Image (spheres, rainbow, N blue to C red):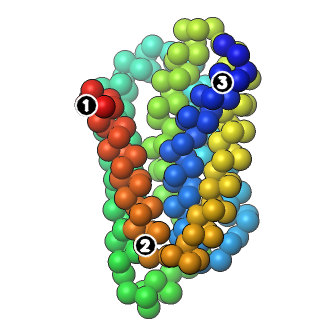
Amino acid sequence: MSLLAVFGIGVGLSGDAFAAALTHGVKMRRMIYRHALVIALTFAGFQAAMPLLGWLLASQFTRLLNPIDHWIAFGLLFLIGAKMIWDACRTEAEHDAGDNGLKIGRLLMLGIATSIDAAAVGVSFAVLEISILQSILIIGATTLVLSFVAVLVGHRIGVRFRTPAEIIGGLVLIAIGTRILLEDVGIF
């Protein structure tokens, strides 16, 4: 497999992380670049770690998680998306009482939820005998850059359109989870 093909896989895998990072940017009251970097590093770390885990555990990992991975991803993304919508619908006074802090628990759940499909890619890398180190570096770097950009773009959108953008961000996360669920049960 060529480096260009692995880069394409990296871009494809980072799509969910991009959307999730975008929603984090929307929620930022003021731009804190350190938080943007933590968000991007978290998503990049999970997007790189999951293919490695899939590659290491190959078929055993797939057999264990395959029946339920789509439910896990759907559940996590649905809960996080619903919470975002709930938060967006609070009164402005409640909104202003919120801090600009980074919620690490939510970030880690999103990192896991958006990277479950990357484990399956790791399994395919093992079958195809592809250089795993080179692949995870490309996937991680691609996700890092795209997620960082997504936080910046999300913040720009959020400054102007905070409440509708947060609602749309929550709906996007729910849609991503629903798409994962529907694809894995064979509807899409």
Q: Position of residue 145 (x, y in %)?
A: 71, 47
Task: Give the quadrant of the C terminus.
Answer: top left
Q: Which residue is mark 3?
A: 6
* Distance between the alpha carbons at the discs numbered 3 and 2: 36 Å
Quarter of the image with the N terminus in it: top right
Identify the element where label 2 is drawn: helix
Residue 15's spot in the image, x, y percent? 54, 42
| Residue that numbered label 2 is attached to | 164
Pointers 2 and 1 in contact (C-beta within 8 Å): no
Residue 11 placement, left or right of 166: right
Q: Is residue 55 above or below residue 45?
A: above
Residue at (46% x, 83% y) in the render: 95
Mark 3 vs mark 2, foreground winner is 2
Q: Amino acid at mark 1?
A: Ile
Q: Are marks 3 and 2 in contact (CB under 8 Å)?
A: no
Q: Is residue 28 above or below residue 146?
A: below
Please give the residue where the numbered disc 1 appears in the rendered image. 187
